[in-house]
Image (cartoon, rainbow, N blue to C red):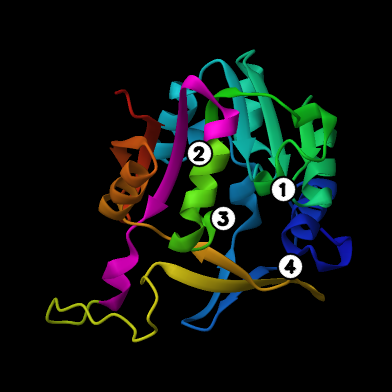
Amino acid sequence: MDRTKDPMGSAIRDYMVQKGRSADRLRVFSPMFDEDEIPVDTLFRGYDEMPRIEQRALDMARGRILDVGAGAGCHALVLQQRRLDVTAIDISPLAVETMNCRGIMKAYEQDFFRLGSQHDGARGLQYDTILMLMNGIGMVGTLQRLPAFFLLLDNILAPDGQLLCDSSDISYVFEDENGNIDYPDTGLYYGELSYRMQYKDTIGEPFDWLYIDADTLREKAAENGYDVEVVAEGEHYDYLACLTRQKF
């Protein structure tokens, strides 16, 4: 990723350098919603400050662990402090530098979808646990991209491994006062969104993001040889799913 187009990484770096006194907003824009904001301090929270579904995922993590889209490394840091074998990856060079400064021993700049083709630290490995938290499976972007995602899992997930990911069913966003749901007439699945981020004068490239409901995730996973178990539910239509290979 180009450092000049890395708003989240810039916000993460500033927050660390300023010891939590970041004065600027990490702004999020989408054609479908009003401008939003990501509180940067949530990317640095400790275990006790995390929502229950993230805590559950960390408690379930085992073996060789891959933390995908690790950001400032809050999840990887908890696991490392528990003396677990965790590798953290992110496409943001500034986020990875921050993780290194925070003492995370194995943190690499790496595009998940190119895993194994770039950095020696991640090449050719299989993982017992893959974490994609804070709506992390959203990075798949669209339902159409899910088969490629599962094909990658076939290569990097150990035979008895688990993918722990969280997402949200955002159908409630389209519900009117009478309880009727009116999805936008875009021809897309209602959880397929596009975003852009800005921090100070740093504006990132547009990117696709997927919010997938649990039933659709089960359906798509089954088509690609995986089972889905919802192991925890949050307070805001969010849930934690555990994906494992189907046993025949």
Residue on which disc 1 sits: 111
Q: CA distance from mark 4 to mark 3?
A: 25 Å
Amino acid marked by disc 3: Met
Foreground: 38 or 229?
229
Q: Secondary structure at mark 1?
A: loop
Whichever of callouts 1 and 4 sits on the residue coming sooner in the sequence is: 4
Residue at position x 60%, y 59% from top? 39
Q: CA distance from mark 1 to mark 4?
A: 27 Å
Residue on which disc 2 sits: 49
Residue at position x 39%, y 34% from top? 243
**Which mark is drawn over residue 139?**
3
Q: CA distance from mark 4 to mark 2?
A: 22 Å
- Asked if labels 3 and 2 touch by Cβ distance under 8 angstroms, the answer is no
Q: Residue furthest left?
A: 178
Foreground: 161 or 144?
144
**Which mark is drawn over residue 146?**
none
